[in-house]
């Protein structure tokens, strides 16, 4: 295609876009609301990195390591330093009740690790309920006006490949690796819950173990999910998958501006699907009886 006024521009644009998009025809690469779905082969990492280098961004990451989950922290941090926004400024925030068991991990230049104390708890529901609250408060007290983007990640996982600037967006969610059939999405189905998603509704089933975006957008998400979670609790309701259910309700209403493929949160026990060319981040196999308090 050539435009009479600026032939070069049209030619380059069509060629480059064609080159990038035609590489993946086996997967959905855009949602019906026109958010990109990020798969290996759909982006140019050098181009993206150069765009965000000029913007001089800072990314925050939160991770909770309460009780025995502290055992996952070392691998998480070591692999994150290598693969998560390598070459960019990243501030990691670890929330734990075991301050003296936090491993000494040397971060690359420009990257920091901050440890915050949280109370111990024997009930996962309590840890889960407080996760959104603590993210909300961290943003209000520390991150607002200092940090551009934030990702909130499960600690029982490791990085195996690049997770970088291609994942940036206003509101970002990850498609759950095991759930791709709408009729089986395990949303909260009781209308009394504030996490309710009606049958036939919902776009994707998203992971509770990884989400992010612009600090302001994630603040809104955390605040909303926390309030809904607490208001449910006052009425004696706990959503099917706790904060993951509230996150899914939030994403159904608000729509993520970027969706990450299951490359961004795989599960080690799952065999790799053929459309997953690269596993970037994956949940480790854990012995539930050994690590969970109840
Ligand atoms: C989780 C389930 C039952 C009891 C306790 C926990 C738990 C979760 C915990 O004792 N300590 C803790 O730090 N967590 C945090 O919540 C971890 O960051 C963990 O990655 C996250 C979500 O819990 P997971 O990873 O067990 O949930 P799944 O759905 O990934 O298995
Ligand atoms: Mn997990």
Image: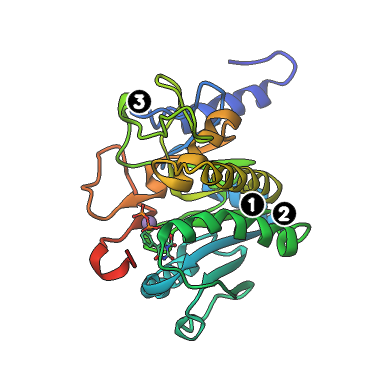
Judge by depth and name the residue closer to the eye, 28 or 246.
246
- The vertical placement of 173 against 61, above or below, is above
Residues packed near mark 1 inside 10 Å, few (<14), some (14 to 19) or many (20 plus): few
- Ligand 1 found in image quarter: bottom left
**Tags 2 and 1 touching, CB below 8 Å:** yes
Q: Secondary structure at mark 1?
A: helix
Taking 96 as reference, is 283 left or right?
left
Residue highlighted by disc 1: 50
Taking 63 as reference, is 291 left or right?
left
Residues packed near mark 3 inside 10 Å, few (<14), some (14 to 19) or many (20 plus): some
**Tags 3 and 1 touching, CB below 8 Å:** no
> Which is more N-terminal, label 3 or label 2?
2
Q: Which mark is residue 284?
A: none
Which residue is pictured at 58% across the width and 15% down the height?
1
Return the x and y of residue 263 as percentages of the image width and height: 38, 46
* Image coloring type: rainbow
Q: Secondary structure at mark 2?
A: helix
Please identify, in this view, whether the residue under mark 2 or under mark 3 is nearer the observer. Answer: 3
Q: Which mark is residue 182?
A: 3
Q: Secondary structure at mark 3?
A: helix
Label 2 to label 1: alpha-carbon separation:
6 Å
- The vertical placement of 202 against 282, above or below, is above
- The vertical placement of 81 against 33, above or below, is below
Residue highlighted by disc 2: 54
Which residue is pictured at 48% across the width and 37% down the height?
248
Which residue is pictured at 56% across the width and 36% down the height?
250
Toward the right, the furthest residue is 145
> Which is more N-terminal, label 1 or label 3?
1
Return the x and y of residue 118 as percentages of the image width and height: 55, 71
């Amino acid at each position: 295609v050539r435009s009479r006024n600026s032939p070069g521009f049209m030619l380059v644009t069509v060629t480059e876009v064609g080159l990038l998009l035609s590489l993946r025809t086996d997967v959905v690469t855009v949602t019906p609301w026109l958010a990109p779905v990020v798969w290996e082969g759909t982006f140019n990492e050098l181009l993206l990195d150069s765009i965000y280098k000029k913007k001089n961004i800072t990314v925050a990451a939160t991770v909770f390591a309460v009780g025995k989950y502290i055992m996952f922290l070392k691998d998480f941090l070591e692999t994150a330093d290598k693969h998560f926004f390598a070459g960019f400024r990243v501030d990691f925030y670890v929330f734990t009740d075991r301050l003296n068991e936090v491993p000494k991990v040397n971060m690359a230049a420009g990257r920091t690790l901050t440890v915050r104390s949280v109370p111990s708890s024997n009930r996962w529901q309590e840890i889960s309920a407080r996760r959104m609250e603590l993210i909300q408060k961290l943003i209000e007290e520390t991150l607002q006006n200092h940090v551009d983007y934030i990702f909130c990640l499960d600690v029982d996982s490791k990085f195996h490949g690049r997770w970088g600037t291609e994942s940036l967006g206003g509101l970002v969610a990850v498609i759950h690796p095991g759930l791709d059939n709408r009729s089986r999405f395990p949303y909260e189905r009781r209308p009394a819950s504030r996490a309710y998603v009606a049958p036939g509704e919902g776009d994707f089933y998203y992971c509770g173990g990884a989400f992010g975006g612009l600090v302001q957008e994630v603040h809104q998400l955390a605040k909303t999910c926390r309030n809904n979670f607490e208001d449910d609790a006052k009425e004696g309701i706990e959503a099917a998958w706790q904060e993951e259910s509230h996150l899914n309700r939030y994403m159904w209403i608000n729509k993520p501006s970027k969706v990450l493929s299951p490359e961004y949160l795989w599960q080690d026990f799952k065999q790799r699907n053929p459309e997953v060319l690269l596993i970037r981040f994956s949940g480790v196999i854990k012995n539930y009886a050994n690590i969970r308090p109840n």
